[in-house]
Every structure is written in structure tokens, then in C-alpha cells.
Image (cartoon, helix red, strand yellow):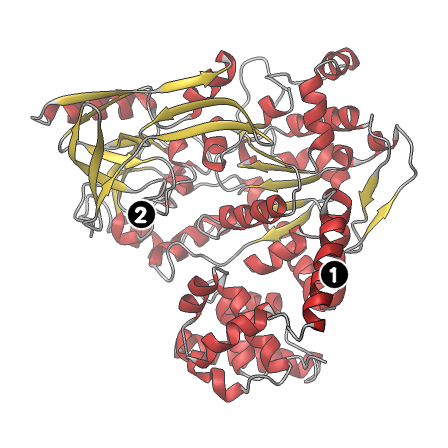
Amino acid sequence: MTQSHALTLLKTGRSIFLTGPAGSGKTFVLNQYIKYLKDHGVNVGITASTGIAATHMGGMTIHSWAGLGIKDSMSDEDLSVLAEKPQLVKRFKETEVLIIDEVSMLHHFRLDILDKVARHMRSVRRSAERADGGHFHDKPTAEDTSSYKNIPFGGMQVILCGDFFQLPPVARMGEPEAHFIYRSQAWKDANFTVCYLEENYRQGSDPLVNILNEIRSGEVSEEAREQLKERYQAQTNSDIEPTQLFTHNVDVNTLNEVELTKVQESEFRYEMTSRGKKPLVDVLKKSCLAPEMLRLKKGARVMCVKNNFDEGYVNGTLGVVVSCGPNVDPVIRTAQDKLVTIERSSWEIDDNGRILAEISQYPLRLAWAITVHKSQGMSLDAVVADLSRCFEPGMGYVALSRVRKLSGLVINGFNENALRVHPEVLEHDRHLKELSGKAESVVEHTDEKEVTRAHQQFLARVAPLYTLGKRAKEDRRGNNASAGQQKITTFHKTLPLIQKEMTLLEMAMERKLASETIISHVEHLIGTGELKLAEVMYLRKEISHQHFVKIEKVMEEIATKQGSDDLPFLSPIKSKVGPNISFKEIRLARVLLGYVKAEG
């Protein structure tokens, strides 16, 4: 499924499971949707299964957000105690959309507990509405004070995000047996729509993509094994020393201490500051990758642990300290030979605009080494991985998928477990892909007006000011129209960029949209007759000749079977052309081959 299709489904109010391999853009889609919700005044809860993942998202753990703590069950008495906490009740009542990231590490029984708590806490509301899983539109139920108890998660839209091929849930001493969340009753009751993103945005056409896909398939070829063997104690293509990944904390701490000691420069210390309730501050400190006491020297190997696109670094950017000192912001030199001044940053626990706790520190940590577990969610330029002691299914996959390109990977130790993924996940992954393909077909077969109506109906239900704002906007449009002013559509903003023969990437950056969205604009403009096919043929260079020929052949086969007047569906094409050809290439080729629906 493409990112744009996933975003379309999210906006309908369905509860969604957003998944896909590392680098497929899951976090990008989530951030797009969060922005959309906040722009419309919708209260959204942003959480994750672990503290580290939560800080990446700028939220809090689901255990803390929902008042679950470390409970492995929830009695009626426990529910009554939670209902006596006004702030917690208010949070559940006001939250219309709940996001939980990195759900591969969330225990199945905790999702059931969350469902039970949400139904109870939201049942005090006056009326309830439910999402009808078979259609885009929502239907209201009877207005009574108990109806929310009969609706999954009390009527909230719940967005689960993660990849079951990554680290699984681990049961602590005394806890019930841990299973993936799809074994929970809440998963079945909520009937999550699956959005499986399959296009890789991180490594492009790098050989590492095929290796990771083969690990995910459970069948690693000899060619892939040989490519990994070639990285054994190899050299990286980076000018900067790579980060070493270990499976155990003791190895990480030892190496970082040893390497810092070797640096013959003065040491400077930067202490973390904090504010808020101590238990919440402690949660932030434990989950934040920046240390409470940051020790730096000129020449120290460091890693940025937060995104700051304006300053030119992201979570996982590697660098070397070129200057530091008391009351002076550190300056690092990145792998791209760029000097970046690192300013203090904050990590917060935010409850719909109210800061409950905050810590402040320079978003850096020593980066000669890091654990595989803490690397989850990062994209690194260069990695040395010791995978000789892998003990969890998916651990090797997580480590290998951290690096952007195969040429940036060095392997110092390896065992067969590093290529092992959970056997149950292999089978379930096929099922998830099938469900995602069906959901994508629904989007492609649904009239654009119906989709827009579904989006508007959802906003009307969850955004109190949406209807009022919509009416005001329509009034302004009426006034503008009477004054002879005409609204410029999003398609017509893209049109002059196409006429300038800009690339997809250039247009996407100019419009601040995804490339798939630009392709949809091209489809629309050709369908309305405002663009001729010849005017967009320059985009043919965006697809390699080999890929284009392969796509064309498959499309001809499918078009022959389903009828020449129908658009060939993306998922069937993808299943035939294989993992090396992206959905973006398929969709663009479909346009360039003349498969465009006429717009009335």
C-alpha cells in the first residue's frame, strides 16, 4: 500500500494497523496524520509501547497515558480506582484518536486491558458513535450513558503502528505468557484495517533491501548470505567512524568508556535539567537516549538522538565533536562533512497541550557503541554489528535494518539466529498483506466524492469546531466567488510545476507533499484533460527501462483479463513484478502507459 492510500484510510476514522518494513515511512505517515488532526483541533493521544519509542514520537508510554502501570490484569475494583482520577477521566473523555507506536513489543494482554479501561472510562459520555468497518461512513448508535462500554476502545479511533518482524514482547518474571497483540481479543473486536506500506524510502535500490526482504520471507538465499559475508570486517564507505551495535548493555558501556578515555583532550560535562512531577520526570530520564550527565571531549564520537530538520540533523546522525566547553554549545562534524551547532533540546510528556514533565539536555550521546534494542527506530550512516550473541527472533533484522546502505555495514560477529525471525510472524505477515491489499482495492474503487464525504463525516464527529469552521469557509468562498475570485485547487498548484518539467522529488519538496500525491495530481489533471499525456512523458526517466518494461508487460496481462476500460489495480501488479519495483514506480508507469480514468 502507498503512503497516500494509508493516509486516506486514516482520515476516515477507521481503527488502523499501520505496518511495513524499516524505511517504508510509517513514522512519516503518522506525523502527517497527527498534523492533520491537530490542524482540525482533534484531541490525539500520542503514545508508544516503550519509553524510547515514546520520546521519538514526542509522547508518553501507553502504560502511563492510560494509567495501566505494570498491571497484567484489571479488576472492577481497579477500574473504580482509575475512574476516581479526574485528570485520567478527562484524558479519556477528550481523546478522539489514540496512537500507539512500536506495538511489536506490546503484550497482547495489555491491549485487552487498555480496551477494558477505555470502554469503562469513556462510558460516562452522553452519546456514542461507532465506525462501521464495512463502509467509509460512520453510523451513530443509541444515545445512552452505557453505549461506549459496547464499542471497542470506547469509540476512540486507535492507530497501532509497528512491525512484528522487529523485537517481540518479553514477559517479566511472574507475568502471563507474552504474545503479539494480534492474539488479543481487542484486536479481533476492533477489526483493524491493515495498511501495509511496502515501498522503501530509506535504502532505495540498495542490495540491503533484498537481504532484509529475504529475512522477512524466512528464506535467505545463498547470494544474500554471501553479500553479508563480504561485509565481515570490511571497510565502510563513510569518512566517519561507524557506530558499533551490540546485543548486550555491558559491551556497549565498556566500549564507550574505553574509547572516551583514549581521546587526549579536556573533558566537559553537561548536566540534564528537569521540571514536573518526579515519577514522570524519571520516566523521561530512563527513556531518553541523551544521558543525565553528558561527557564530551573534542574528538569524541557522538550520535544525535533527536530530529531537527531545520538544523540539518536527525535521530541517528553520526558525528565527531570539533569543539565544546563550559556554557558553549557543542559543534559536531557530520559524516557529510557538515559543521552543526547542537543546541539544548527538550523532551516532554504532553497531555493535549499541558506539559506534565520536561527534561532538557543536548541531544547527543557517545556513539562508539549502542545496543540493538536502543537502536530500534534509528537510521544510521555506518554500523559495525556484533551479532554473534543474538538471542531474540528479529534482533538481527533490527540491527541490519538500522543502516541505510549495505556499504555502510561491517559485521564483526554473526550466528544463524541473526537471520531468524519469529515463525508465527512469517505466516501472519502473509495474512496482513492480503488484508492490506483488500483495503487498498476499496480505496481505488471508491469514488473520490465518497472518500471526501467520509473524511468530512469523521471530522464532524471528532472535531467540535469543524462544522462551524467549514460553514465559515463556505461563506468566505461565496463572498470571494461573488467578487470574481476563484479558489486555486491543489491540482492547479501542481500543474505549473509539471509544465516546468520538474522531477517528482522537486515537486514533492516544492509542494511539501509525498511523491505519490504528486502522481495522483498528474492522474487527475490528465483525467480532466488539463494535461496531455505527452506533457508528462518526461517523467519516464524516473523509472529504469528494465522496470518499465516489466510493469508494462504485467499491466497488459491484467488489463486483458479485467477489461481494457478498467484501471489495473496496484496490488496485483506488485505481486507479479516483485519486491524490487516500488508502488510509486507502478503507479507512475500506469499513468505513462495511458491507464487514466476520465474525470467528469
Q: Tag 1, which secondary structure?
A: helix
Where residue 278 appears, x then y in whole percent? 48, 12
Above or below 236: residue 103? above
- Locate residue 157 relative to residue 63 in the image: left or right: right
Quarter of the image for residue 293 reads top left
Q: Residue at x 44, y 74 (%)?
A: 547
Quarter of the image for residue 74 reads top right
Query: How many circles with numbers are drawn on the protein?
Result: 2
Where residue 583 appears, x then y in whole percent? 52, 65
Q: CA distance from mark 1 to mark 2?
A: 42 Å
Residue 443 can be seen in this image: yes
Of 17 and 143, which appears nearest the observer? 143
Mark 1 surroundings: few (<14), some (14-19) or many (≥20) residues within 10 A? few
Residue that extends furthest to the front in the rendered view of this protein: 483
Tell me which label, 1 or 2, sits earlier in the chain: 2
Type of amino acid at the residue the image marks with label 1: Asp
Residue 318 - label: none
Residue linked to disc 2? 312
Of 560 and 49, which appears nearest the observer? 49
Q: Classify the position of the N terminus by image quarter.
A: bottom right
Mark 2 surroundings: few (<14), some (14-19) or many (≥20) residues within 10 A? few
Q: Residue at x 63, y 41 (%)?
A: 159
Residue linked to disc 1? 475
Residue depth check, mark 1 versus mark 2: number of the one nearer the observer: 1
Above or below 41: residue 125? above
Residue 595 can be seen in this image: no
Type of amino acid at the residue the image marks with label 2: Gly
Q: Residue at x 41, y 72 (%)?
A: 503
